Image (cartoon, coloured by chain):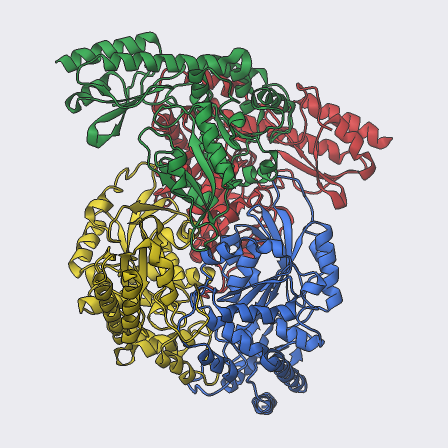
Chain colours: A blue, B yellow, C red, D green
């Protein structure tokens, strides 16, 4: 299943892709002489200043290694062990981080059923009970993913409704933005309009899935929440000693809006792929395509042959639903070739 | 204190240095096409195979982001929360990881007093009591640093005595090898002779301080201890999605023994620096120089002026003891210039 | 709502009741002289020996303070933080222990939907996936409640099917037996037939709800699981220094089968109460009554008046479902009086 | 070593003793009818009101099962995982709770060397460094034991100096008062003068060692610290469902100052025992006797014979130092008989 031809591209995940050449080039630019470690260097300071242009002057911003690290450490500032964080039953933090939040925050996650990866006020409301009852975990935060794990996107209004509802009940709003760039590209809005401006309190802003080697940013729109974050980050094993190299990668993403170009491109490839799949008899899209992911039911008997063309993930075995993910480096040709061959295979 | 001239080098820490050019070059070599994420790629497999040539065929090897990550996740395999890990009172895990082991393993660390960063059988023995007493934490592991935080080095025999003693009492031996390369270079032995072959059960093998961007390896010489490590690594926020880029860095370290050349060079620069400092009246070395660190008592009134020459850390304020660290990129000239100017300053 | 007449009884919970007089009397019998603390006394040893007559010679048995303590510490022996414990969405460990399992075990709990508090093979199977996938928590145990939180009871065969299925997949079976006595009384079987003999690996055997002041037993049918339990219990804040007084309470429960008499009586009172409620027009039972709990939908407009007669808990506000719990000290008259008056109130 | 004559008394520990008859009698007084569980009953409310007469109107008071539970849950309100709690190296929380604080709070404990179980400003000051350094745990609390594990007692002034110093540096003061009654009795002061009035922020007030079956109180002199305590207690497995029975025990301690009478008596017996031991050639007291404990070096060759007379603990094997503890039920005759026989044995 896994190709041995290392130059090929696939639809397995945006983290199967390598690094954007401009990101790689940026590393060399900062690789000169000694600078203070652990983020006390001027490169880090300057990149954070640039990120503030996107997220606002009051934003407190910290780099970490990984998306799970960003989510866990962000949630630690929003929940004590007797709290619960309400999230979609499909949320990465609920399904795909091997219980990291439960272990590191020590709290329960309360899942909300969802068809498309999004949750709303009604779903959240079902977990808003037993405030003050010491037998019950106390809701302290809501976490949403933007874009969701199903490649769908919350509009700024949808987020505002959730944040308003959460705040009204004394809860904070966390956003897993591993693919925030893709959501912003889809909506044609700034990063800020779908995070801080829409009421998000703490954001994991992803870099890795958008062309970086490794690096995410935790963004606090409420600076008070960040007070102890340096300690949490170090204790949480997410403090890079040679921080300038994470900063340099984000710097490259910010130059000439590379983040937006890469995300827009990936989104466009996903749309094209979706249109192609939709045009094949026997394939049925299962989700709206609003970011860089396509979900589709495939003819079960052809899945193995299709995976020979390009690796992709079978998402829901029982209904032979597959997930296709595009990346900054997915080409038009990758898509066309796959669709043409897939059509032939399925046509038999 | 922090230089604004980014091309300068300092004696603050080996993580103030940048990345070895060959390490940087290695990233580009693997940056082509899509490969399976999370370490299921052939680059990772091949680097691990190369590392096994150094650590033995049975070694189970995993890449993680950071030294604290390597230590914490390694210790998790050696201790349950009711256990204790015995270590030097100067150990990085005890003093400098913001309580990461206590939080993530959930256990106590039991400190052994030390003058030079090393511990021995007698010091360990003081914590070997109350086995079977349910009020007392149960010793399950010893952790030593090689080289130590004081730049001293355990001989293979010294390690063997500790591992033999530990095993005899049912304890495992963990080694924080953030500077293992420097120790091996100093002793003129292989990496294996001072780790697995000397009875170490779990090793944190450092890459970052020896010229990498970020990346460490957890090496299990007892493969059974590694059984659940993939889950621990993911839950522990230390699983890199684009793993090939950590593998590539280690690959560069292995090519033409770059790891050894870099470590030997740094050690040599430390020796030279030590000799120079020792030759200045009013300066007194406080530790043997066996790796890439020099500890010395400086005339308190000149410290500020000396730090203008090159940043370095005041280690023990009360006795005006400073720590100097050399790196793969420290030059002879860096040392000579510093010594010459320091001599002049102190001579007044 | 809370009565100020302290001699009254209610249907709120079996822990609203006091202590059985014979249990209280038993305390005085052991209150003489000094004995070793922390369970190293002969009273404790002798009570454990008596409990082994019920649970089998190989059973390892430990006293703890509370039901939550018993559950959490039992589960700690069955799950590491990267594991998950599968349980009913209505399980006490999932809904009513303020996230204790998540905090103390550090693992996720995976809820199975249920109508009657019971789960079966199919419900469990839905969580048996992604074995070996390091992004997913690994199922290591199933936990069932006997009797359930809905007052229903698993037959020995039902438990055997679950334990067989769990063991087949490498999972252990945990039982929350806070009301195990009520289940045994209902089924007319021994305590062992619905625990160890039916494949349960670790049991929380409840005493408090059956007439004790405070005290539960953790029973390991697989003695190897108990190896480190003494340390877990002490670290887990569940080791009573004057253990003889917990032992004495269990001793009283065992004398003349007081445990069975009390549980049978409570069950009988629940049946009588259920029959009475069922005979009132406008009241609808919602669960089978197999232990000492009755669930019924009440006319919403009369709930306040009914609670004046006797305190009871509104279980599901949305459908005005109430829970009634009987106890060892509930009298026939308590039931008759309540039913008669309730009938009058509802008849208007 | 452990006597089979259950009516005998020993000098092993104050938790080897049984329950004061008045405490036992108090249980029956509250054992009537049903009352709200989990502390929502009027007995609990009334006992807490009585305790407030001792600890002040603003004190927030909660009952828990055990001393370790009281300490751990109290410390949870004073430290996050990246903090450290400074305590004597001999503190119960450091040496004798099987790492409970490290596991449950998740933080490091920083030990202060001590000869007599007490710590002072200088010892604490050694741990007050690296504030703001994210590699170092951040001191957030000091914990002292009153009386100490060596049977010594802090004067109100000594406590005030510590609390002043702690508060000045932003730290809170925790007190493990498992034997607070003995300290108060020794000093002839109220409970409050050596806790809240002397600057203690959170206190574990012990009942078990002073004649109760099981029960401690966590007392918050700063009510804000108590805000989330109900959740911490439930999640922390320390919430007794039939709380009235813990309340009743404390009630008995308060009636006619039973707590003071019992503690004073135990202290007197310790003084008498100390005087007796001191009068025997070959025995050397090692600590001041200010509470109900006596520490003495015994002739090693006679220890076994002396333990036949009465069980006691060998505290420091290397110097054959023993610990003797007296209790509310220790009699003058117990002491006299032991001394007489010990003298004879040692005289040979």
Pick the quarter of the image with the N terminus of chain D. Answer: top left
Residue C78 rendering spot, x and y as whole percentages: 43, 49
- Toward the viewer: D344 or D270? D270
Give the vertical position of D48 relative to C112 (above or below).
Answer: above
Report the quarter where the C terminus of chain D lies: top left
The x, y position of residue A29, in whole percent, is 47, 80
Where A188 falls versus C274 (above or below)? below
Does any portion of residue B323 appear in the rendered image?
A: yes
Q: Which x, y percent locates residue C293?
A: 64, 35
User: Where A150 falls versus A331 (above or below)?
Assistant: above
Task: Classify residue D313 by image quadrant.
Answer: top left
Residue D119, x across and y down, in percent: 38, 32
- D230 vs D122, left or right, is right
- Name of the residue lying farthest toward the right: C348
Q: Outermost residue, left direction?
A: D348
- Of residues D229 and C291, which is closer to you in this image? D229
Residue at image x 22%, y 20%? Answer: D284
Quadrant of residue B77 in the image? bottom left
Label tally = 0
Q: Is residue C217 left or right of residue C58?
A: right
Above or below, A128 against C50 in this view is below
User: For the point 49% across and 33% down, which residue is it?
Assistant: D164
One can see residue D19 in this view: no
Q: Nearer the viewer, residue A33 or B305?
A: B305
């Amino acid at each position: 299943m896994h190709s041995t031809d290392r130059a090929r591209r696939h639809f397995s995940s945006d983290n199967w892709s390598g690094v954007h050449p401009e990101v790689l080039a940026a590393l060399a630019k900062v690789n000169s002489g000694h600078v203070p470690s652990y983020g006390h260097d001027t490169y880090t300071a300057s990149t954070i200043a640039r990120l503030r242009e996107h997220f606002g002057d009051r934003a407190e911003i910290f780099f970490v290694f990984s998306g799970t690290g960003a989510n866990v450490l962000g949630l630690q500032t929003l929940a004590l062990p007797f709290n619960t964080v309400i999230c979609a039953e499909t949320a990465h933090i609920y399904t795909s981080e091997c219980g990291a939040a439960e272990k590191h925050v020590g709290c329960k996650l309360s899942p909300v059923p969802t068809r498309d990866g999004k949750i709303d006020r009604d779903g959240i409301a079902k977990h808003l009970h037993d405030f003050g009852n010491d037998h019950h975990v106390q809701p302290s935060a809501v976490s949403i993913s933007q874009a969701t794990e199903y490649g769908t996107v919350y509009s700024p209004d949808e987020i505002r409704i959730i944040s308003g509802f959460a705040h009204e009940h004394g809860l904070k709003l966390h956003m897993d933005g591993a693919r925030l760039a893709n959501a912003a590209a889809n909506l044609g809005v700034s990063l800020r309009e779908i995070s801080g401006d829409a009421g998000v309190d703490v954001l994991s802003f992803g870099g890795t899935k958008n062309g970086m080697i490794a690096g995410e940013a935790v963004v606090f729109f409420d600076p008070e929440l960040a007070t102890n974050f340096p300690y949490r980050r170090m204790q949480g094993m997410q403090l890079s000693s040679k921080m300038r190299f994470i900063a340099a990668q984000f710097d490259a993403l910010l130059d000439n809006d590379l983040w937006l170009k890469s995300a827009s491109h990936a989104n466009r490839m996903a749309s094209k792929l979706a249109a192609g799949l939709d045009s094949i008899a026997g394939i049925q899209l299962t989700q709206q395509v609003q970011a860089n992911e396509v979900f589709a039911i495939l003819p079960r008997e052809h899945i193995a042959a299709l995976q020979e063309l390009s690796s992709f993930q079978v998402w829901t075995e029982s209904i032979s639903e597959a997930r296709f993910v595009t990346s900054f480096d997915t080409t038009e040709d990758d898509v066309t070739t796959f669709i043409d061959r897939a059509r032939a295979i399925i046509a038999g």
